[in-house]
Image (cartoon, grey):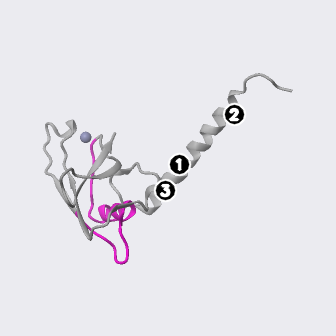
């Protein structure tokens, strides 16, 4: 009987986590085939309700250091809630795909969408690199 420590166990656990993550990544890519940004949100969060409102605005300002010498104007994306539905991550990403959001700097990984402080209906990206 083996009694010594088996590091193989731990390695195989993290392998299956990676597999799970890759599977999700593929599913998300199929959901949004034409995006020019990276969705860094888990599949389980796609149906999370971001707003109960009929319409929200997403502000995308390009104020990271990547644009220090190449100014880019702020974009605003108007998102209307779907008929008989609410504004979820999935709905927002579909709209952003259709409205051609284009993130091309190091900070193109959308990790979340958060309401702008002191604003009723404006939201902003939480971006990672
Ligand atoms: Zn950047």
Magenta span includes 79: yes
Instruction: Report the mark closest to the observer, 3 or 2.
Output: 3
> At numbered mark 2, what does the secondary structure look like: helix, strand or loop?
helix
Which disc is residue 22 wearing? 1
- Taking 36 as reference, is 31 left or right? right
Which image quadrant is residue 78 in?
bottom left
Q: Name the residue beneath numbered marker 2.
A: 9
Which disc is residue 125 wearing? none
User: Spatial distance from mark 1 to mark 3, Cα to Cα?
Assistant: 14 Å
Label 1 C-beta lies within 8 Å of the nearest ligand 1 atom: no
Dot 2 crowding, Cα within 10 Å, few <14, some 14–19, many 20+? few
Magenta span includes 35: no
Residue 18 rendering spot, x and y as whole percentages: 56, 43
Q: Nearer the viewer, residue 121 or 23?
A: 121
Callout 1 touching callout 3 (CB < 8 Å): no
> At numbered mark 1, what does the secondary structure look like: helix, strand or loop?
helix
User: Spatial distance from mark 1 to mark 2, Cα to Cα?
Assistant: 20 Å
> At numbered mark 3, what does the secondary structure look like: helix, strand or loop?
helix
Instruction: Report the mark closest to the observer, 1 or 2.
Output: 2
Dot 1 crowding, Cα within 10 Å, few <14, some 14–19, many 20+? few
Label 3 C-beta lies within 8 Å of the nearest ligand 1 atom: no
Q: Name the residue beneath numbered marker 3.
A: 44
User: Which residue shows up at 66% across the image and 37% down it?
Assistant: 12
Q: Which stretch appears magenta?
A: 78-105
User: Spatial distance from mark 3 to mark 2, Cα to Cα?
Assistant: 26 Å
């Amino acid at each position: 009987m083996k009694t010594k420590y088996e590091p193989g166990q731990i390695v195989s656990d993290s392998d299956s986590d990676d597999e799970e993550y890759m599977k999700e990544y593929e599913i998300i890519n199929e959901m949004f085939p034409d995006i020019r940004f990276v969705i860094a949100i888990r599949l389980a969060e796609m149906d999370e309700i971001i707003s109960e409102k009929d319409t929200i605005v997403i502000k995308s300002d390009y104020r990271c250091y990547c644009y220090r010498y190449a100014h880019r104007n702020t974009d605003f994306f108007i998102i209307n809630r779907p008929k008989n539905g609410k504004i979820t991550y999935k709905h927002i990403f579909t709209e952003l795909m259709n409205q051609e959001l284009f993130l091309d700097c190091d900070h193109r990984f959308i990790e979340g969408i958060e309401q702008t402080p002191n604003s009723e209906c404006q939201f902003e990206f939480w971006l990672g690199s």
